C-alpha cells in the first residue's frame, strides 16, 4: 500500500474541497481501513533516524507538539515540497543561509 500520494486519500480531499463531506469521509475511512489491515504487523514509518519512538506516531507527534522546535521526520518531505515553492520567490537564496543538522540514522540507513 502506498501512503504518500495515495489516490484514495487524494480523491477524499477533492471531495472535501467540493463540499462533499460525506463522500470525503467515506473515502478517508476506506483509506484508514486499508492502512490498518496492511500495516497491522509491519513497519509503516518512513523515518530513517535512530529513535526509540520509531513507528509510534502517537507519541512521536505528541513529543514534537510539546517541544515545538521542528516537525517529525516523516512530515519533512511534504513540508519541504511546499517550502520549496515559497523559496522560489527569492531564487532559493535562503539555501545559502541554512545548514542542516547532522542526524544519527538507524543502522540499515548508515553509510
Image (tube, rainbow, N blue to C red):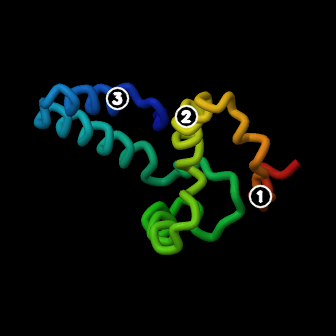
Q: What residue is rendered at 61% in x and 34% in y?
A: 87
Earlier along the polypeptide chain: callout 1 or callout 3?
3
Identify residue for label 2.
86
Mark 1 residue crowding within 10 angstroms, few (<14) / some (14–19) / many (20+): few
* Residue visible at 31% across and 44% down in the picture: 32
Total labels drawn: 3
Label of residue 10 in the image: 3
Residue closest to the eye, 72 or 36: 72
Residue furthest toward the right? 111
Q: Position of residue 77 (x, y in %)?
A: 58, 41
Depth check, mark 1 against mark 3: the one in front is: 1
- State which mark lies toward you, 2 or 1: 2
Residue at horizontal 78 percent and vertical 49 percent from the top: 109
Chain-order first, disc 3 or disc 2: 3
* Left or right relative to 103: residue 21: left
User: In the image, what residue occupies the spot 32% across and 38% down?
Assistant: 31
Which SS class for mark 2? helix
Q: Which residue is identified by label 1?
A: 101
**Residue 105 locus on image (x, y percent):** 76, 57
| Local SS, label 1 | loop
Question: Is 50 on the left or on the right of 3, as rendered?
Answer: right
- Which of pointers 2 and 1 lies earlier in the amino acid sequence? 2
Residue 82, disc: none
| Quarter of the view holding residue 8 | top left
Task: Measure the alpha-carbon separation of dots 3 and 2.
Answer: 22 Å
| Mark 3 residue element | helix
Amino acid at each position: 500500500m502506498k501512503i504518500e500520494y495515495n489516490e484514495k486519500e487524494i480523491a477524499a480531499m477533492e471531495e472535501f474541497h467540493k463540499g462533499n463531506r460525506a463522500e470525503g469521509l467515506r473515502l478517508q475511512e476506506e483509506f484508514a481501513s486499508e492502512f490498518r489491515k496492511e500495516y497491522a504487523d509491519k513497519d509503516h514509518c518512513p523515518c530513517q533516524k535512530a529513535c526509540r519512538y520509531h513507528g509510534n506516531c502517537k507519541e512521536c507527534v505528541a513529543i514534537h507538539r510539546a517541544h515545538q522546535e521542528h516537525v517529525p521526520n516523516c512530515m519533512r518531505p511534504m513540508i519541504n515540497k511546499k517550502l520549496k515553492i515559497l523559496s522560489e520567490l527569492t531564487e532559493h537564496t535562503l539555501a545559502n543561509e541554512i545548514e542542516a543538522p547532522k542526524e544519527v540514522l538507524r543502522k540499515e540507513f548508515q553509510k
